[in-house]
Image (spheres, rainbow, N blue to C red):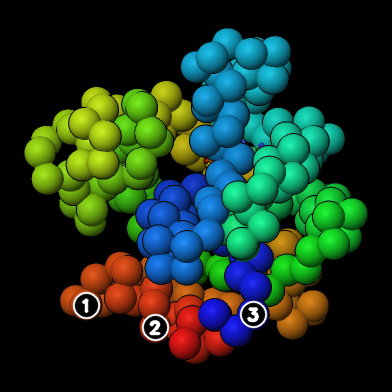
Amino acid sequence: MDKKANLILLGAPGSGKGTRAVAICKVLGISQVATGDLFRKNLSENTDLGKLAKGYMDRGELVPDDVTAAMVKERLSMPDVRAGFVLDGFPRTVNQAKMLDDILSELGENLASVIYLDVSDDEIVKRLAGRLVCKNCQAPYHTEFTPPKVDGVCDKCGGALLRRDDDNPETIRKRLKVFHESTYPLIEFYEKKGLLVRVKSEISPKGLEADMRDILEKMGLLK
Ligand code: AMP
């Protein structure tokens, strides 16, 4: 690695951020920081943060920026992210992106790149319909694109694979609306900073991990 991989994965819900983040972390030996996973963990542990986030998540709305940014700051202050990180699901608004700039400068860190997964809404709906997640370790699967070896069972930890509560047609529509209104402006925000790398969502016959290796190599993050 010739520059520190502090990365953001940007894309609509269901664009494949989670699966790509896992592949990038494996290839570069860095940590995934997924705000949706952090909220779901708090929800399952019934913490105050989980109780606060639940209503927003059930409605497909964004949890308030200050609450989300505080959770991200705490996570980015942990020792494992010093080697680099992939932010998955944060920032989701221009305000959050500005808050992230402040957090990173306080921590003495910089962003290396922002990877934008470019996927059409039609494709998103198809993808979300087949999405599964491990109840235990949150590993992402898809019935068609990245199926588990055994139906309904996580390859990594043996946990049960479930559909997310918010992957229902009504909440999906709301989450896509939120993406277009609040998150899409981030593409221009990071393009202006010269940080944006656009990636098509299709996976080549070489497989997801090999594709991510090629992309990271082109970005100068992998020799
Ligand atoms: P995800 O797993 O990234 O699709 O996130 C699931 C839900 O968690 C979202 O629909 C939001 O309610 C909440 N959430 C995740 N990340 C953020 C964020 N950066 N800002 C606000 N809410 C978020």
The residue at the point 65 percent across, 73 percent down is: 4
The residue at 61%/70% (across/down) is: 5
| Residue behind mark 3 | 3
Mark 3 vs mark 1: in front: 3
Q: Quadrant of ligand 1?
A: top right
Quadrant of the image occupied by residue 34: top right
Give neighbour class at mark 1: few <14, some 14-19, many 20+ (Cα, 10 Å).
few
- The reply to whether dot 2 and dot 1 touch (C-beta < 8 Å) is no
User: Taking 97 as reference, is 75 left or right?
Assistant: left
- Cα distance in 3D space between marks 3 and 2: 16 Å
Residue indicated by mark 2 = 214
Q: Kindly give the residue lying farthest to the front in the view shown.
A: 79
Q: How many marks?
A: 3
Location of residue 131 with respect to 93 vertically, above or below: above
Label 2 amino acid?
Asp
Q: Position of residue 201 (x, y in %)?
A: 39, 68
Give the amino acid type for the residue marked by disc 1 in the picture. Lys
**Residue located at (19% from left, 76% from top):** 205
- Mark 2 Cα within 10 Å, few/some/many (few <14, many 20+)? few
> Residue 117's spot in the image, x, y percent?
50, 66
Q: Which residue carries the number 1 mark?
A: 206
- Mark earlier in primary sequence (2, 1): 1
